[in-house]
Image (cartoon, rainbow, N blue to C red):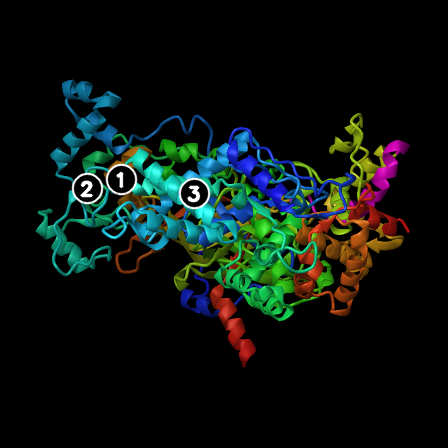
């Protein structure tokens, strides 16, 4: 695992205001505060790569796995796309999957209204005790039942409890290629490491080994697609670089990785709107601060633990990337392109898969079970001293970011308070 | 004259399909009799909407397409005296009126707006109809209805109620008729029964005053002052003018003037090439218009500021939608005032995205369009239209490998002497704004070449828009143009030679009072000549403000 150092404690990050202009004045000049450049990330995609041969073998999604388990006659009967719902029902019945809506409304998929204990308040996230009570009240298997689909439903399935259904990992293959996008996070060249597209040895990206054989992830490696698709548009990631004396070469800049509370919107040409203002999410745990340096227009940050929000229609996931490094280039059109490398914690990554539910996993063609087993197997970072097991997996994400402005009300408040004294 | 107007009104009322009113008071160069001429001005779309909201409530929707307003020498207010209503236009007014009236009789509105119904003491609803017709008619026609008009309205209501089998439908038909009447759609002066020859009556005064200061019809207080004759006296008039200027609605009146003066309604039809200016959209365009109006009222109304400071102000109304255009962070969710720091390229009205984007092409800037707009709008000068056979090939070739900047391409275009004469007047000013692209976004270079923003205004050299704004601030032509424009807006016609002394007096007063727009409006509103009918000269010796202004500017 190597260095993967733990940078400033997140609690401390709340209190640290970066040098050089991030304390945004209400009335900034054209171009924004001097010495500061901020960006909104329009897309943040798991990246690996490899040639077409390495990508030729793909792992099946959960319903396809189930289909392959059926006797030939039944498989033939349920294999047509028109029989998908019937196939789903067959699978749910066989494995005893459950999914129930906690609140009135249509949350998609196969769901019915759950009976709720009297102490559960409408649209208030149930406590773990309440979840257990709801599960028991609705006949879930003992000690089973988890929140899913943005905490709108309670479910028991191969996504919530993958180790209950190991058979659904059938047909899974890891990414077998030798080439992968990424970064040598631990400074070593191991037998499991990849070679980067630019020839860099010892690239650590075991998450790609685990999930790189899924078609959706392979497709999202296409730069053209990455430019069009906006991820986490409801809560976009923001990168603010301040204290810049020279935008081409600067030995010390402050970098904040933040989450916006305003939605990302497209401009008239369909691309992310540049130079829009984003108010910060008030959650202080989403303020990540580190330092970095710029060499020939390329920014590299010091490692830091990052909380990165992915908030989509179904997913509301905060990914924790430990020992994360951002390496990105300032481009002449004002944008910032690069990667975010680090050790993604297994729990935060799988939280996203779990929330997808069985139907969501089917939509994107993955097997929750296979992914859970794979990331546990290929995990390579941050060993838990108690269990001796790794808690995180090396990963690489590419991103495209356009210029933006960060509205930091806490900084403004602090600035006003300072002025008043 | 009264008979003439009445005949006209009757004729207009009589034939819906053939309604066509052509009025001459705004047309320059046409000889007329040496008698007082009442002004007849069609309500603009904005005025129509304001009046409906005032009378029936802001929740009542006005849905439909209006006959387009027409600008005469830049002002729709002057054009309002020259426009008619076409047959198809009247159909539109009728459709709009029917939709408005339908809302009057909804369960939530009827009690408030109608308030009565046929009952035991009024079995056929005649009394109720008379009450509604008198009450709403006073607000719609901006004068009390005559006994004959009320009787006719009641008779029509009862007849229609019989035919339609319902009192509300009958009364609604009468209201639709009132909403399509020339007495509503046109502001028609009524000569005063007393007072000096050429004076208008108190209700016509109230109407002129209300549309000048609030851009809507008189409220109950002003109508009461007209009924009592209070506004015929200087004290009563002053009290009403001061009351109206102190009211928040005066801001609406000021906005209406500047919207017309700067021709900001054209922004409604503005579109940009989304690939070249992706940050510009229809909603951004609307926000630029609002920004300019808010910036102006912040300075001139809220702070009672100096009009000339509009050209050097760093206080811009701002909203988040405009942040990407101005390349600034906008922290407030709604509208707020953003103050650009000293040295920032944004300074004054000339650097607002509304004007910069409006006077540019969909995919490139146009120093010519910008220069022409500045000369015509802010300096009241007249720039001739280009001939039809101009070859724009060089100017339009934005990717010309050798002529990389707009200035270079325009200079090549000016090799043609015929073109050069007009471009000399326009391009110099427009080139000073070249650091703002066709969407109003700041840039320092064009095709990597630093943009040259030097030029001359009135033979005085400038370097950049901050310099240019200061020259505008200091130029008497700029303030004089505002004065003549406000006068033309108020009177709905161009300046004639005989009006020039009054304009000169206004100019002196404007300068003496520190170029306060509010004081200028107040002076006009208190001026007896504002309430006099125009006296047309016996011969066609009409000169326009533009002609007068051009003469002065030629020096």
Q: In this view, does B88 lie above or below B339?
A: above
Location of residue A157 (image quadrant)? top left
Residue A192 place in picture, x, y as percent = 40, 41
Q: Residue A157 carries which label?
A: 2
Looking at the rendered structure, the number of numbered marks drawn on it comes to 3
Query: Residue at label 3?
Result: B152
**Helix or strand or loop: what does disc 3 sit on?**
helix
Give the mark, 1 or 2, whose residue is nearer the N terminus: 2
Residue B174 place in picture, x, y as percent = 41, 41
Mark 3 chain: B
Marks 2/3: CA distance?
A: 78 Å
Mark 2 chain: A
Query: Tags 1 and 2 in contact by the CB under 8 Å rule?
Result: yes
Badge 1 density bin: few <14, some 14–19, many ≥20, Cα 10 Å: many
Q: Residue at left 32%, top 38%?
A: B161
Marks 1/2: CA distance?
A: 9 Å
Q: Which mark is residue B329?
A: none
Instruction: Residue lying at the far bottom in this picture: please name it.
Output: A421
Residue B282 place in picture, x, y as percent = 55, 42
Res A238 visible: yes
Query: What range of the chain is rendered magenta?
Result: B415-440
Mark 1 chain: A
Q: Which mark is nearer the camera, 1 or 3?
A: 3
Q: Is residue B243 left or right of residue A128?
A: right
Residue B179 place in picture, x, y as percent = 47, 43
**Helix or strand or loop: what does disc 1 sit on?**
helix
Q: Which mark is residue A368?
A: 1
Magenta-span inclusion, residue B416:
yes
**Helix or strand or loop: what does disc 2 sit on?**
loop
Q: Residue at left 33%, top 50%?
A: B128
- Viewer-proximal residue, B109 or B272? B109
């Amino acid at each position: 695992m190597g260095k993967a150092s733990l940078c400033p404690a997140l609690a401390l990050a709340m209190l640290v205001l970066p040098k050089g202009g991030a304390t945004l004045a209400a009335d900034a000049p054209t171009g924004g505060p001097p010495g500061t450049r901020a960006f909104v990330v329009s897309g943040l995609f798991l990246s690996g790569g490899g040639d077409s041969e390495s990508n030729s073998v793909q792992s099946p999604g959960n319903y396809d796995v189930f289909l392959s388990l059926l006797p030939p006659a039944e498989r033939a009967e349920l294999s047509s796309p028109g029989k998908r719902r019937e196939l789903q029902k067959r699978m749910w019945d066989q494995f005893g999957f459950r999914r129930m809506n906690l609140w009135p409304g249509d949350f998609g998929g196969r769901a019915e209204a759950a009976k709720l204990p009297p102490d559960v308040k409408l649209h208030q996230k149930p406590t773990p005790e309440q979840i257990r009570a709801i599960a028991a009240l609705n006949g879930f298997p003992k000690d089973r039942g988890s929140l899913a689909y943005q905490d709108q439903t309670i479910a028991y399935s191969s996504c919530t409890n993958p180790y209950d259904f190991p058979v659904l990992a059938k047909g899974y293959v890891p990414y077998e290629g030798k080439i992968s996008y990424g970064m040598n996070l631990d400074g070593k060249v191991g037998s499991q490491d990849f070679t980067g597209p630019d020839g860099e040895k010892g690239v650590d990206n075991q998450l790609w080994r685990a999930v790189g054989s899924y078609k959706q992830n392979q497709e999202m490696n296409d730069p053209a697609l990455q430019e069009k698709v906006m991820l986490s548009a409801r809560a976009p990631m923001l990168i603010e670089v301040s204290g810049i004396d020279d935008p081409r070469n600067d030995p010390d800049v402050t970098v904040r990785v933040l989450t916006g509370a305003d939605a990302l919107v497209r401009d008239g040409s369909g691309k992310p709107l540049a130079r829009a203002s984003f108010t910060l999410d008030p959650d202080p745990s989403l303020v990540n601060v580190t330092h970095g340096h710029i060499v020939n227009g390329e920014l590299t940050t010091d490692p830091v633990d990052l909380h990165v929000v992915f908030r989509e229609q179904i997913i509301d996931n905060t990914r924790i990337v430990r020992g994360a490094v951002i390496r990105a280039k300032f481009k002449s059109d004002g944008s910032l392109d690069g990667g975010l490398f680090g050790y993604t914690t297994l729990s935060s990554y799988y939280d996203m898969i779990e929330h997808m539910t069985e139907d969501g996993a089917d939509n994107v063609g993955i097997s929750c079970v296979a992914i859970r087993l794979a990331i546990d197997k290929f995990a390579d970072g941050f060993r838990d001293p108690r269990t001796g097991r790794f808690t995180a997996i090396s990963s690489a994400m590419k991103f495209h970011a356009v210029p933006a402005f960060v509205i930091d009300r806490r900084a403004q408040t602090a600035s006003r308070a300072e002025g008043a004294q | 004259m009264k008979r003439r107007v009445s005949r006209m009104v009757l004729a207009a009322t009589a034939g819906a399909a053939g309604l066509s009113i052509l009025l001459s008071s705004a047309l320059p160069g046409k000889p007329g009799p040496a008698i007082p001429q009442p002004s007849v001005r069609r309500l603009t779309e904005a005025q129509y909407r304001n009046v409906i909201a005032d009378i029936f409530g802001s929740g009542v929707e006005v849905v439909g397409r209006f006959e387009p307003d027409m600008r005469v020498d830049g002002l729709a207010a002057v054009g309002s005296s020259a426009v008619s209503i076409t047959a198809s236009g009247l159909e539109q007014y009728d459709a709009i009126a029917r939709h408005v009236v339908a809302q009057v009789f909804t369960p939530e509105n009827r009690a408030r707006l109608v308030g009565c119904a046929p009952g035991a003491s009024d079995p056929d609803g005649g009394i109720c109809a008379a009450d509604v017709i008198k009450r709403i008619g006073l607000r719609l026609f901006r004068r009390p209805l005559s006994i004959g008009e009320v009787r006719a309205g009641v008779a029509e209501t009862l007849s229609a109620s019989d035919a339609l089998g319902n009192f509300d439908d009958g009364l609604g038909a009468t209201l639709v008729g009132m909403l399509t009447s020339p007495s509503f759609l046109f502001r028609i002066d009524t000569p005063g029964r007393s007072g000096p020859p050429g004076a208008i009556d108190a209700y016509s005064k109230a109407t002129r005053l209300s549309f000048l200061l609030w851009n809507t019809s008189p409220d109950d207080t002003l109508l009461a002052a007209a009924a009592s004759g209070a506004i015929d006296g200087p004290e009563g008039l002053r009290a009403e003018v001061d009351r109206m200027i102190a009211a928040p609605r005066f801001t609406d009146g000021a906005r209406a003037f500047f919207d017309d003066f700067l021709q900001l309604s054209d922004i409604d039809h503005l579109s940009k090439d989304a690939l070249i200016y992706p940050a510009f959209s229809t909603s951004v365009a609307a926000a630029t218009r609002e920004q300019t109006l808010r910036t102006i009222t912040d300075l001139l109304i809220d702070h009672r500021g100096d009009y000339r400071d509009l050209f050097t102000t760093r206080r811009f109304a701002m909203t988040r939608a405009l942040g990407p255009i101005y390349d600034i962070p906008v922290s407030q969710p709604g509208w707020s005032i953003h103050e650009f720091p000293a040295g920032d390229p944004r300074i004054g009205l000339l650097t607002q995205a509304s004007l910069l984007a409006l006077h540019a092409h969909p995919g490139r800037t146009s120093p010519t369009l910008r220069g022409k707009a500045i000369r015509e709008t802010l300096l009241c000068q007249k720039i001739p239209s280009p001939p039809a056979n101009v070859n724009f090939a060089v100017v339009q070739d934005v990717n010309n490998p050798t002529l990389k900047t707009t200035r270079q391409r325009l200079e090549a275009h000016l090799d043609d002497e015929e073109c050069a004469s007009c471009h000399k007047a326009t391009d110099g000013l427009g080139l000073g704004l070249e650091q703002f692209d066709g969407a109003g976004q700041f840039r320092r270079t064009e095709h990597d070449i630093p943009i040259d923003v030097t030029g001359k205004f009135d033979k005085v050299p400038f370097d950049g828009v901050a310099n240019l704004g200061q020259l505008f601030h200091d130029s008497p032509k700029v303030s004089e143009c505002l004065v003549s424009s406000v006068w033309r807006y108020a009177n709905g016609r161009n300046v004639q030679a005989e009006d020039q002394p009054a304009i000169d007096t206004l100019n002196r007063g404007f300068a003496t009072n520190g170029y306060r727009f509010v004081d200028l409006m107040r002076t006009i509103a208190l001026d007896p000549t504002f309430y006099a009918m125009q006296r047309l000269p016996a011969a066609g010796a009409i000169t326009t403000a533009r002609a007068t202004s051009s003469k002065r500017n030629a020096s």
